[in-house]
Image: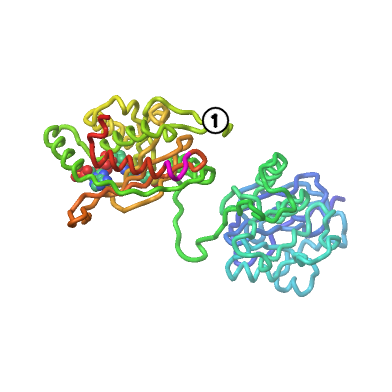
Amino acid sequence: MADMREATVPDIGDFTDVPVIEVLVKPGDRVEKDQGLVTLESAKATMEVPAPFAGTVREVKVKENDTVSQGTVIALIEASDEKAAPKPAAPAAKPAAAAAESAPKKSVSPVSEEGRAGPKASAAKAETTLAPKSAPPEQRDESGPRSPPVPFDADAVAPGKVPYASPAIRAFARELGVDLARVHGSARNGRITKEDVQAFVKSALAGGMPQPGAAAGGGLNLLPWPQVDFSKYGEIEEKPLSRIKKLSGANLARNWAMIPHVTQHELADITDMEAFRKQLGAENREVKVTPLVFMIKAVVAALKQYPQFNASLEASGEKLVLKKYFHIGIAVDTAEGLVVPVIRDCDRKGVLELAIELGAISKKARDRKLSPADMSGGCFSISSLGGIGGTYFTPIINAPEVAILGVSRSSMRPVWTGSEFKPRLLLPLSLSYDHRVIDGADAARFATYLAQCMGDLRLLLL
Ligand code: CAO
């Protein structure tokens, strides 16, 4: 007669309502004693619940995301070996510490998260049945269906490099020869899933990753992003990034990593420009005329003088595309993040017209009403932090443009005229340029000319 027994969650310390993150068996599966049935994930560790005896799984009582505690029935197993199957009255499992003394393999095998779990998990680690990392392969039961869990010696791995994955995923990765330290975990708390391992393998086959054998981040490769459990060090709060931040972040990261940036600094004397701006503003009170519109005009003049700045590298890297139009992108700070709408044909517009358009496009940006068309076609960008403060900064080039002007806050400073110091209003400029396209000497010329135009607006008429 069939000897049907329950496989239950054994003593797992103080943990209760622990989520099931993986179900490792299905009805009909033949399991050996100690083979993993499900993987649980506590706040601090992942652990497998092993089969208490050998047999055939007849029914699985839990599914992924269920929560379980000590005594929860995981599966009904038809025992195949009377000697291996404990009497029904026997406790589901010995307390781990006792088991540690009496059995070569214990009933629960926690793996500490990132190797940096709290004291409780560390204690649990000491109670595990994991084969020591140095155990020869044959002792690790490589051929067995699931157990024992993959060796894991958290203390032997540098903090921040310890991959967070269930024993089953570790076994899966080991089968494929994947070093989990190089796999990005997409699940909660950076846990690595089977899909992550598969994606890593696909990427490696496609040549997108350092090949096995290369040290993680070794040679000239980038290191993997550090995965840190910040809550270990104090209270934290998680806040999802806005859609704009995620999009702009990816663009900024690419541009910073792929474009060899150099930033040329310059000081423009805008004393006279500022006097004119104030006069213009007083005469046109309905329009807000800020220094930025004059800077747009000065940039157009400098682009005309130095056409290699009004250009883009073709994707092949073989050609420079020179533009005969002057569309200027303006970085606008919004509650959702940075956006760069483009003002078209700035060479054909006067400062008042530009002031009106700048006001309209900034409002549109802050109202989140910009369309993709509003943000495309730019030749050169200006990022003005002048309304906020600061002296100099390094703006990141907005690819495929080849340069960007950063503007900081103007201030009155004493300037030596040759015979005396005079108070002058000086504006700090930061010109970042793509050194593949623009030489340092040309950048210095461009920045100097820009400052001259701002210092003497008559140059804009030429
Ligand atoms: N020096 C001194 N004062 C300046 C100045 C400068 N360089 N630039 C602007 N100001 C003054 C303006 O005259 C205005 O003064 P009043 O209120 O007295 O008239 C005040 O600062 C605020 O200006 P503003 O910022 O509203 O307007 P703007 O035309 O200078 O800039 C915009 C418009 C959309 C570019 C700006 O609002 C903005 O979003 N800037 C942030 C851009 C940004 O985040 N860049 C970072 C990118 S890199 O991460």
Disc 1 is placed on an element classified as loop
| The quadrant where residue 143 appears | bottom right
Indicate whether residue 440 is drawn in magenta: yes
Query: Is residue 231 found left or right of 429 in the rendered image?
Result: right
Q: Residue 354, percent across and down?
A: 26, 30
The residue at the point 32 percent across, 37 percent down is 366
The amino acid pointed to by label 1 is: Lys
Q: Is residue 350 left or right of residue 145?
A: left
Residue at x 66% of width, y 68% of height: 155
Q: Is residue 339 visible?
A: yes
**Residue 73 % position (x, y):** 69, 54
Q: Residue at x 76, y 51 (%)?
A: 177
184 in magenta? no
Which segment did they paint magenta?
438-442
Q: Mark 1 — residue?
A: 319
Establish if 399 lies above or below 161: above
**Residue closer to the observer: 424 or 157:** 424
Task: Work out which residue is located at the far left of the displayed protein and give it.
Answer: 283
Q: Is residue 414 above or below residue 287?
A: below
x%, y% of residue 398? 44, 38
- Specify the farthest residue to the front: 419
Q: Position of residue 190 (x, y in %)?
A: 58, 53
- Assess disc 1: are there few (<14), some (14-19) or many (≥20) residues with their C-alpha within 10 Å of its C-alpha: few
> The C terminus lies in which quarter of the figure?
top left
Q: Quadrant of residue 98?
A: bottom right
Mainly helix, strand or loop, the magenta region?
A: helix
